[in-house]
Amino acid sequence: RNTVGNIPMQWYDDFPHIGYNLDGKPIAKPIRNKDELDKFLNKMDNPEYWRTIFDKTTGRDHVLTQEELTLINRVQKGSFYDASYDPYEPYVDFFTHEKMIHPVSNYPEHKRSFTPSLVEKRKVGKLVHAIKMGWLKVGQPKKEEDEEIKFYDLWADSHSELARQKMHVPAPKMKLPGHEGSYNPAPEFLPTEEEIAQWKEDEPEDRKLDFVPQKHDALRRVPQYPMFIQERFARCLDLYLCPRQRKMKFNVNPDDLIPELPKPRDLRPFPTVQALCYRGHQAMVRTISVDATGQWLASGSDDGIVRVWEVSTARCVREVSLGKNQPIKCLAWCPNPSVCLLAIAVESTVVILNPYIGDRLVATATDNLLQSFEEEEEGGEEKSDYFAAVVPNNGNAQVFLHQLTKRRSQNPFSKCKGAVQSVLFHPNRPFFFVATQRYVRVYNLVKQQLSKKLFSNSQWISSLSIHPGGDNLIVGSYDCRLSWFDMDLSTKPYRTMRYHKRAIRACCFHRKYPIFASAGDDGSIVVSHGMVYSDLMQNPLIVPVKVLKGHKVERNLGVLDCCFHPHQPWIFSSAADNTIRLFS
């Protein structure tokens, strides 16, 4: 039986015993390993189950007696504790409403109630002395508090006493020593040999304590603290070399600093899940492109093979080999839907190819276009007749413009300013974008002059893409930054986004939906909502909505290229894991 007495039993929650007996030995807790089934069987078999309770003090089950049950019932009903107590016994009227001649208590008052108080005499004497000396003015009205507020120029005179008092900031007090600083600390504050060795290896600024706690038998055995002078000197340096000044504290709610952005589910449609995976390449897939109809997808890899896939079934319908060990750097479909042409860049050569897929009439018209040759010197510029190519590390001849129908090529720049990374045509106007390592230059092809120079604020530009409206541009860089340019607003980025942990390899806009995406070496594709308004006074709305993952990172390379479907809110991506994936 437990004999610990009336103490809080939660003290023994974490111990195997429940108290101590008269001999000082611990009393083990009774084993209570009954599950719900045992409790149910006990409830059915034990007739005394309804009056059995668990006593936490003794740790045993207790069967209530009849007297205890009667007491519980009286308490539940709100009755008195003692059944023999009568709350309605006759009332004894000690005091009556009649005025009596003699008092109830005839005890005489004490003698000190007739003598003057010495304490009050001293207080009155002090007040009289203050009035005589003129310290206390009697009868004068109190000054009203609605006086003019005095303002002090704290910077008028740095040596003024008032300024010094106003700007005085008391030095912070040192932390008081704890139990570990005692000469006889508890055992849990004494470190082990491993902790002492670790304390000696740590740097002084990384240590939790400046000393090692030690235990002494008596206070007279405590030696002198060896670091006393050094600590006092460091304290003086802190007070002397660390200036203290008052700073205005602004109570700002952190939630107010976050802009109110719409929820992603209100910005649909955008790609969310992986739908198809295109497998067949034996090396990393560097570039992909979707034709204008959205039915065919072309891809080029480092194995020198160009594959044409059917988008809906992931079936490879055409395979063209351009030579072993000749990686396909870039490829693109002709945006004109009346012809079926594919431009492929291999080393320093651009191959124009008719893959012979789809409608036979379109394939025949494409052959006629390739076999025809116009020798006119001047003619009307047809859309999709020009394409540009970049030859890196080629001196001043890094950019070439090719005209397909007349078989002509030209170098538009006599001198290139920097290493050209990427080029792009404006979708509506005769502008030509040339991206070097840190700048994007916009040239007017009609006037043949520089129109604008954009500053990317990044170290190395990797890709760029223009909005279908033509007034906004996104630029990706190898230092994990994606910059959005509003060309009507400024030559500097309107917003810089850092959603990738590693280099950005590609970025693209959708032709119809207000979404854009960026792909990087971290193996992820970040899809964002980018709404451009026709009202020039309203800034674009940019909201990241989805991070697509599925590609594996191999040889420190992730997603190498991405492009949107021309009609659907789908996105294609190619990566170093030799696969192409469709997210819908």
Image (cartoon, grey):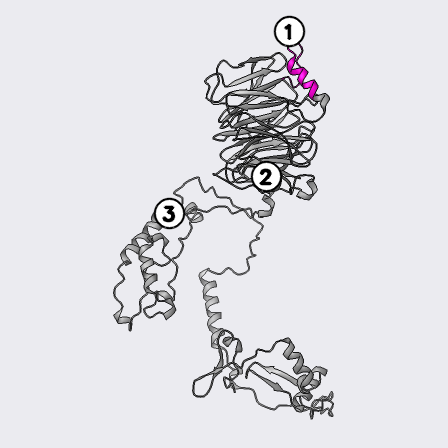
- Which stretch is magenta? 363-385
Q: Position of residue 263 (x, y in %)?
A: 67, 44
Q: Residue at x 58, y 36 (%)?
A: 280
Say which of 368 and 33 sits in front.
368
Q: Is residue 103 visible?
A: no
Mark number, residue 376: 1
- Where does the C terminus fall, quadrant-wise? top right
* Badge 3 amino acid: Cys
Label 2: state its secondary structure.
Answer: strand
Q: CA distance from mark 3 to mark 2?
A: 46 Å
Q: Position of residue 265 (x, y in %)?
A: 68, 44
Note whether 541 is above or below 407 in the view shown.
below
Indicate yes or no whether the magenta region holds residue 82. Answer: no
Q: Are marks 3 and 1 in contact (CB under 8 Å)?
A: no
Label 1: state its secondary structure.
Answer: loop
Specify the quadrant of the image occupied by residue 200. Answer: bottom left
Question: How would you classify the magenta stretch by its main secondary structure?
Answer: loop
Note whether 536 is above or below 44 in the view shown.
above
Say which of 105 and 381 sits in front.
381
Specify the quadrant of the image occupied by residue 211. Answer: bottom left
Q: CA distance from mark 2 to mark 1?
A: 47 Å
Q: Position of residue 356 (x, y in %)?
A: 66, 24
Q: Is residue 366 visible?
A: yes
The residue indicated by pointer 3 is 242
Q: Residue at x 67, y 87 (%)?
A: 48
Mark number, residue 526: 2
Q: Residue at x 38, y 64 (%)?
A: 178
N-terminal-most mark, 3 or 2: 3
* Badge 1 amino acid: Glu
